[in-house]
Image: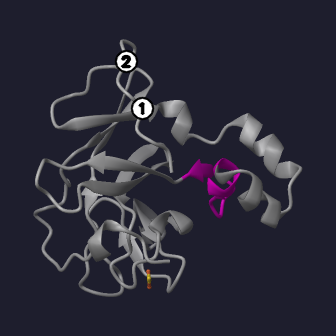
Amino acid sequence: MDPLPSSSPSTPPSPEGFIYVGPASNFLPSKSNAEMNEDLNETEKCAVSQTACERKIAKDGDEYLIKVVEIPQPAGRYPPQKRVAISYFRKKWYGFINICPHQGSALDRGAMVDIEDMGIVWGAGITCTLHNWTFDASSGQSDSSRFVIDTYDVKEIDGHVFVSQAPRNAHVLGPRRDFGGRELN
Ligand code: FES
C-alpha cells in the first residue's frame, strides 16, 4: 500500500471534499513493471515487488492495477483511516473500500470484471478472491448478498489523482461491514 504523498509546494490543490493520492502513473501498469514480471516467477513477484504483485490482467488481456491508499477520516471518526482501493479499469477510475464485508478479505487481491447482461457491458465490478462475491464498483451492491461496499469518487486532474473523502453511494441501502478498518486475510 502506498502512503499518501506528503504535502509540498508541488502537491496540487484538491477539489473540495477530495484528497490527493498521487500521480496517475502510480495507478497505471508501467512498462518497467511488465519487464520486471517477465523475469520473475509467481512467488518471486510477490516476494520481490509489491508493485509487480498488483499487476492484473483482464480476460481480454487489458492490464490494470488495484492500489490501496489510506484516506484520513474527519476527527473523532473510527477507524481514523479508511483503506480505499483505486483502479483505472476500462478507461474509468473506480474507488472502493478494500475490505470485503463477507469475511474481511482484502479486495485488492481480487479482480476487476465487466458487469454485463446479454453481451452488453454496463459497468465494472470487483470480485473478491476468497469466495468470489462480486460487488458493483460504482453502486457497491453485491451479486451474492445484501451487503454493500462503500464506493468513492475518483478524479484525475492534470495527471494527478484525487479520491472523495466521503463515499459516493451513501444512498444505496444495505448492511456495511468493515471489521474495524482492517482486512482480516
Ligand atoms: S471474504 Fe470476500 S467473498 Fe468471502
Residue occupying the point 20% across, 55% down: 167
Q: Position of residue 70 (x, y in %)?
A: 36, 49
In percent of width and height, residue 107 lies at: 46, 68
User: What is the number of the mark on residue 5?
Assistant: 1
Q: Can you name the residue that lies furthest to the right here?
A: 39
Instruction: Locate residue 167 relative to residue 54 in the image: left or right.
Output: left
Position of residue 18 relative to residue 170, above or below, is above
Tag 1 secondary structure = loop
What amino acid is at disc 2?
Ser
Residue at 22%, 75% in the rendered image: 176
Instruction: Give the residue furthest to the top.
Output: 9
Q: Label 1 sits on what residue type? A: Pro
Q: Which residue range is magenta in the image? A: 51-65
Q: What is the distance, in whole Å, between disc 2 and disc 1 at their CAs?
A: 9 Å
Q: Nearer the viewer, residue 161 or 83?
A: 83
> Are discs 2 and 1 less than 8 Å apart at CB?
yes
Q: Quadrant of residue 83?
A: bottom left
Residue 130 in view, yes or no: yes
Instruction: Between residue 3 and residue 156, name the one nearer to us.
Output: 3
**Location of residue 147 with respect to 165 vertically, above or below:** below
Residue 8, labelled with which disc? 2
| Residue visible at 25% across and 74% down in the picture | 148
Residue 61, x across and y down, in percent: 69, 55
